[in-house]
Amino acid sequence: MDLQIITRDGEPEYAVLPWAQYQSLLKAAGLSSPQPSQSPPASPAPAVDALPAFEQLRSLREAKGLAVETLARTVGISPSYLGLIESGEREPDAAIRRSLAWELGVAGWRDAS
């Protein structure tokens, strides 16, 4: 079986295998096989629904009345790292984006990867 394991932080996160082998596994498990989507790509969302840039993070945090230290510790990062994210010097990973989205109530950031 041609299998590729994708890890994150040393732990397996995804397994990638050829479509035919995936179909064989589904058949062996007695499951129906989903067909790949042949529909055209969806049109981009209007600008109104655009996600706020992380450069706006500071103003969002301040609007919630949160200190840098408070938000950083809640999210699980250092205040200095949050400062780097706010200044645009660092791009947060998916887990940090989800945590920031949760704490700041910005739904779109939860879905962005």
Image: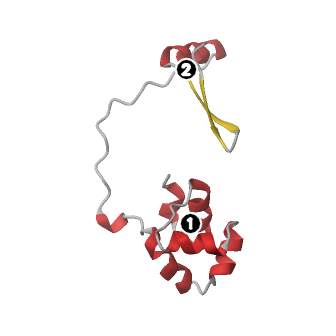
Colour setup of the view: secondary structure
Residue at 51% from the left image edge and 64% from the top image edge: 90
Q: Position of residue 96 (x, y in %)?
A: 60, 61
Could you say which is closer to the camera, residue 76 or residue 40?
A: 76
Residue annotated with mark 2: 32
Q: Residues within 10 Å of mark 2 (few under 14, many from 20)?
A: few
First reached walking from the N terminus: tag 2 or tag 1: 2
Nearer the viewer's eye, disc 2 or disc 1? 1
The spot of residue 59 in percent (x, y) is 48, 82
- Residue 65: name its quadrant: bottom right
Amino acid marked by disc 2: Ser
In the structure shown, which secondary structural element does the residue marked by tag 2 occupy?
A: loop
Disc 1 residue crowd, few under 14, some 14–19, many 20+, Cα 10 Å: some
Name the element at disc 1.
Answer: helix
Q: Position of residue 93 (x, y in %)?
A: 56, 56
> Residue 44 vs residue 2: left or right?
left
Q: Which mark is residue 88?
A: none
Q: Where, by quadrant of the figure, is residue 105 drawn?
A: bottom right
Three-letter amino acid code at the position of disc 1: Ala
Residue 111: give x, y in percent of width and height: 51, 55
Q: Residue at x 69, y 79 (%)?
A: 70
- Residue picked out by circle 1: 101
Res 42 quadrant in image: top left
Work out whether residue 91 or residue 43 is closer to the camera in this orientation and state it.
91
Q: Tell me the CA gap for discs 2 and 1.
A: 36 Å
In contact (CB < 8 Å): disc 2 and disc 1: no
